[in-house]
Amino acid sequence: MNINQKAEEIVTAVIGDMYALDFKQEQFDEIFNELDSAFPKYQPYYKRGVIRQIITKIFFMTFQDVEVDVIEDRLHLKKSFLEPKKGEIFDRVIHELNLNLMDISENIEQYKPLPYLIVIPSNMREKIFKLLEPYEKRKEPLRYYIRTQISRVLEIKRNDIVLFLRKRIYIRNFSTPRELPDGVDRRFNGATIHEMQELYELYFPDGAWEYIEEYMQEILDKEFNFSQISNREFTSKFIHVFKALIESIVYDLQDETDVEVDELQIDSLANYILRRFFSDILLSCTASLLEYVEKRDKNAEKFIKHFTDEVIIDDKNMKVQKYALIDSDNNSWNYNAIVSTLMQWKQAKARVEKQKSKIENIERNIFEISSDISKIDMNIAKAKERFTKVRSEAIASEAGLRRLESDIKKESSSKVIQELNLKLISLKSMHLKNLDAQKAAEYKRTALINKEENKEIELHSWEKNLKSAKEVMKEVHHLNEKVTKTYFLIAHSIIKVILR
């Protein structure tokens, strides 16, 4: 064993899975002393140089980038942070995340139900998210950090895709199309459309679109960001990305169905679903593209001009004759005409949003007033109950007064009369209090009834406003019909030219 091999053995034993900033002078001295004992003939400065290089290498193996210097026997170690603004605490969490991912990498075959699919199970997914959630609550940045480290630790290639589904994390490796014998229907790997329809209905009794749509925005942001992607890249990866999404959705749903499917059936079902929703998926992509064009994004402008210019210069600086962008009404569209329509479409959407906001505000007021009326109803019932009680007490105290006054008139003993008069004074006081309580209860009940009547009038007014606002919304939609039709003509003409 030479000095480098021995140094690596010693350093590996000392560092292990250590976080780099926990490596101190003591550990360095321990490594140096052990290496010095094994190789006493080498100069100290040479041994320190070997140790420095091996330390850098060992930390790199746990995805930690460090700079190590040894100056006058003293260790100086600096570490790069994934997110410098979040500091060391967050970086320690990233290190722990990497260690978890390294466990997966070392046992990768256990996580590959299919040759091209890596599945991080729900318990591990939950563990990973719990690690980072205290430091990053926002969904997109959180997934960015996880995706970045997955790509690094599991060596995800450019054409591989990382998907966060409801239960698991899926890594779909790029694979070439399956080879089939001549004469076999390649669309569904030899299965019939009827067989695919039956399998589809078993997995998606309410349809698959809601599942695809749930992840559409994330796919558009990550894989098809039209402020970055080129036409060549879009067309080369479109089918692969959405087929990978559908395959992952199917696999994710397996434990919710009684049907187990093999690799070939998953591939066939994914092909079937992709064909079934191909236009819908492309329409979502086109809508995203047109949003970027609407914002005058330069890359999106270049992307759409690829279709609208008759002759373009491609990535290899060659002139290429393109298909014309012609809609189903046989209108040709150039970039400026599309932008002009999109400005009108933007105004149309703004009108809808403004009226929608107005309707939501009215509905909110109606809900609040209706809630107030319900509370007032409850209070009226309580006030009525209170009034009934104090009125009964007032009637009872009045009857008691009459009896006591009658008893005084009949009584002849002055001593008894004096005692009865004292009772009479007390009872009169009680009766006055009962009358005041009755009056207060009646006043409160009346006030609540009046308040409810006013609220009913207010509610009726808001309901009339809501009816009027909805009529206005119909007029807005009617006014927008022409530009809406034009927008979708453009969108579908883009889909048509992409499909060519």
Image: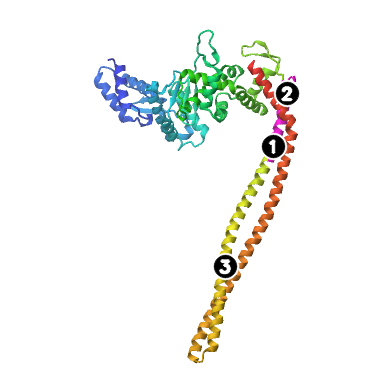
Q: Quadrant of residue 450?
A: bottom right
Residue bearing mark 2: 336
Task: Please state the extent of the stretch shown in magenta in the rendering.
Answer: 327-355
Would you say the magenta stretch is mainly helix, strand or loop? helix
Residue 352 has which mark?
1
**In front of the other: 37 or 427:** 427
In the rendered image, the quadrant that contains the C terminus is top right
Give the residue type at disc 2: Asn
Q: Is residue 385 above or below residue 289?
A: below
Q: CA distance from mark 1 to mark 3?
A: 53 Å
Q: Is residue 334 left or right of residue 157?
A: right
Label 1: which secondary element:
helix
Of the two numbered discs 2 and 1 in the rendering, the one whose residue sits closer to the viewer: 1
Say whether disc 1 or disc 3 marks the residue closer to the N-terminus.
1
**In front of the other: 3 or 141:** 141
**In front of the other: 91 or 348:** 348
Q: Is residue 477 magenta?
A: no
